[in-house]
């Protein structure tokens, strides 16, 4: 049902932003000025495309700041939710972070999605906070030693 592309820079970001615009800006009311940031052009983005239409349907990004790795901007178009795409994206993004040398991965999780991230091994740390008018929590996963 879908095809994945992984990459950096403008070519893949444009498709990632099409999904993010619909999910975050149109559906959730996040201001565009907060949705796009200076990190977008240097992040690793994964975009999933519908195999028949070729249109982007889900996305997520991996960002490295200093020695910390962050997964964020995870978005799946409403029509495709419940099909396991977010979980598949997260597994791919986590795997890529470990491959690049992460010892822990951080996320800012919307409060309603905490259980989803817990099932993937993330734990809450710190206090809840508001980002773009939406309640979030800090979460992390640490690499397990072999």
Image (cartoon, grey):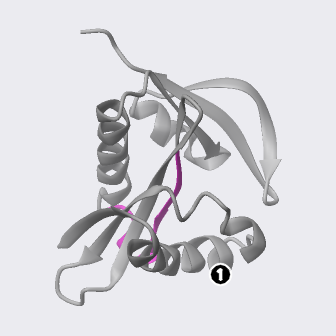
In this rendering, the count of numbered labels is 1
Circle 1 crowding by C-alpha within 10 Å: few under 14, some 14–19, many from 20: few
- Identify which residue is drawn at 65% across, 81% down: 26
Residue at image point 17% right, 73% down: 1
**Residue 79 is a magenta residue:** yes
Residue 32 in view, yes or no? yes
Q: Is residue 46 left or right of residue 78?
A: left
Outermost top residue: 145
Q: Nearer the viewer, residue 25 or 115?
A: 25
**Residues drawn in magenta:** 71-82
Is residue 31 in view from this perspective?
A: no
Q: Is residue 134 found left or right of 40 in the rendered image?
A: right
- At x 38% / y 55%, what residue is drawn? 86
Q: Classify residue 82 as left or right of residue 53.
A: right
Task: Judge by depth and name the residue closer to the eye, 103 or 132.
Answer: 103
**Residue 35 on image: x %, y %:** 68, 67
Which residue in the structure is indicated by mark 1?
26
The one of 3 and 7 positioned closer to us in this rendering: 7
Query: Percent position (x, y) of residue 16?
Result: 45, 72
Does residue 62 sit above or below 53 in this rendering? Answer: above
Determine if the magenta segment contains residue 64. Answer: no
* Above or below: residue 18 compared with residue 115: below
């Amino acid at each position: 049902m879908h095809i994945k592309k992984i990459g950096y820079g403008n070519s893949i970001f444009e498709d990632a932003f099409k999904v993010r615009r619909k999910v975050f800006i149109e559906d959730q009311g996040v201001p565009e000025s907060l949705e796009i940031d200076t990190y977008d052009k240097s992040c690793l983005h994964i975009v999933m495309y519908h195999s028949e239409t070729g249109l982007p349907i889900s996305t997520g990004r991996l960002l490295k700041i200093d020695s910390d790795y962050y997964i964020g901007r995870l978005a799946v178009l409403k029509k495709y939710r419940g099909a396991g795409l977010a979980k598949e994206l997260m597994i791919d993004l986590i795997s890529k972070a470990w491959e690049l040398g992460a010892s822990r991965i951080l996320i800012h999780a919307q409060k309603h999605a905490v259980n989803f991230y817990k099932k993937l091994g993330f734990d809450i740390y710190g206090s809840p906070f508001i980002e773009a008018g939406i309640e979030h929590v800090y979460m992390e996963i640490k690499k397990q030693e072999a």
